[in-house]
Image (cartoon, helix red, strand yellow):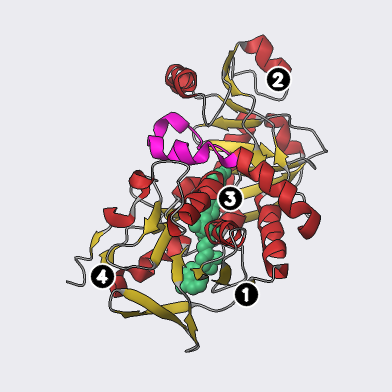
Amino acid sequence: MKIAIIGAGISGLMSALELVEQGCSVIIFDQQHAGQAASWAGGGILSPMYPWRYPHAVNQLAQHGKSLYLDWNEKLKPISGIDFEIHETGLLIFDEADFETGLNYAQQFQQPMQHAEYLQAEQLAQVNPFIHPQFQHAMYFPQIANVRNPRLLQSMIGYLKQHPKVEFIEHCPIEQFNIVNGKVQSIRSQNQQTYFADQFVITTGAWSKHWSEQLDLDIPVQPVQGQMVLFKTPQNWLPTMCMNNVMYLIPRLDGHVVCGSSMAHCGFDTTPTAATKQTILAACFEMVPELAAFPIVKQWAGLRPSSPTGVPYIGKMPELDNLWANFGHFRNGLCMGPASARLLRQLILKQPTLLDPMAFCPTRLTANTLTT
Ligand SMILES: Cc1cc2nc3c(=O)[nH]c(=O)nc-3n(C[C@H](O)[C@H](O)[C@H](O)COP(=O)(O)OP(=O)(O)OC[C@H]3O[C@@H](n4cnc5c(N)ncnc54)[C@H](O)[C@@H]3O)c2cc1C
């Protein structure tokens, strides 16, 4: 079976991996360089930021993130030569208003945060000595990890590019589906090339609304910009991830600390601004004042593929036999990525699924009121 995948972010690349491992041939397209959009820009926390604030369906996918990434790292590393570092730093959350709900949630569901603790000031200082003393207690999730997502993408791309059943076509925007009798026959690129396959998958992230008109569907996916600031500290300096008021710090193994992130509706603009940088810095220095002593080495912005509830669209698109969706992951596409792709592969290949696919079904998409 030949499968065409449109979009090479985490959703497309993971889908490609799942499918080639089952013996399918895959052709994967991206309008730019593969793996340079939201999936590169994200922080890589392997849990929704406050899981109890999300629909259960999001956490059901996210709970598989860490274990599936550990498996994929073992498989890809010998071939790609890249370790994408699943760094189990744990996460401290300082939002007091969430303590009771969060701890109850963790007790009830265990996943995706696994273990949870409430820390008093003394324990907090032991777990992370750099926290500002204004924070006298915290929720602690010692098993939440982060993945070094730019390396993850490089590793997946490296593996897929050497695979005999994979064709990779970059800098090739796909513009049009050619639909005959309820089936996609082929797709056409901006430079008028036509590509045939048996099945087609949309993994176009924040750009997914583009398909609304030709599929006659309302696809409610919008780009939501998020900015980040990167520090370089000594190796092993900051021991845990930290979060307060939806702002966070993520330590990498080599001492880089990723700080973010903002939320803005500004179309497809990915220009970082001085004002947002100041907002991020203020929030992060409030948690960890000593971070201010270290250099900032980068600032960037990415476009989250927002969907109304944050529950992605995964499964067969309405009315068409061979067109599939895996998009709309909003703030959690990296932690949901591996399980989303596994679910998609199981649906395409008619295999038993790792969870009930109903909550993700694209039949939620309604007819496009703009074009009718
Ligand atoms: C600042 C920030 C922080 C984040 N932090 C986290 C986090 O800590 N944890 C977490 O789980 N998630 C996080 N996210 C969210 C996560 O990054 C996204 O949900 C995820 O990357 C979406 O992946 P994707 O593959 O669907 O989209 P993308 O990575 O955007 O990939 C879509 C690809 O499709 C291509 N494309 C689009 N249209 C076409 C076309 N017509 N033809 C060909 N190619 C096309 C694009 O060029 C792009 O490469 C964060 C996001 C941001 C911006």
Closest to the camera, between mark 2 and mark 4, is 4
Q: Which mark is on residue 127?
A: 2
Mark 4 residue's CB less than 8 Å from ligand 1: no
Closer to the chain start, of discs 3 and 2, is 3
The amino acid on which the numbered mark 4 sits, given as a three-letter code, is: Asp
Figure quadrant of residue 187 = bottom left
Q: Which residue is mark 1?
A: 167
Q: Which mark is on residue 48?
A: none
Q: Which residue is mark 3?
A: 42
Closest to the camera, between mark 4 and mark 1, is 1
Q: Which mark is on residue 216?
A: 4
The amino acid on which the numbered mark 2 sits, given as a three-letter code, is: Val
At horizontal 73% and vertical 41% (from top left) the residue drawn is: 252
Closer to the chain start, of discs 4 and 1, is 1
Q: Is residue 175 left or right of residue 73?
A: left
Closer to the chain start, of discs 1 and 3, is 3
At horizontal 73% and vertical 54% (from top left) the residue drawn is: 76
- The span picked out in magenta is 45-65
Closer to the chain start, of discs 1 and 2, is 2
Which residue occupies the extreme bottom position in the image?
Answer: 192
Q: Secondary structure at mark 2?
A: helix
Disc 1 to disc 3, how far (Cα)? Answer: 26 Å
Disc 2 to disc 4, how far (Cα)? Answer: 53 Å
Asked whether the residues under the numbered discs 1 and 3 touch, taking CB atoms below 8 Å apart as contact, a structural biologist would say: no
At horizontal 41% and vertical 60% (from top left) the residue drawn is: 325
Mark 3 residue's CB less than 8 Å from ligand 1: yes
The amino acid on which the numbered mark 1 sits, given as a three-letter code, is: Glu
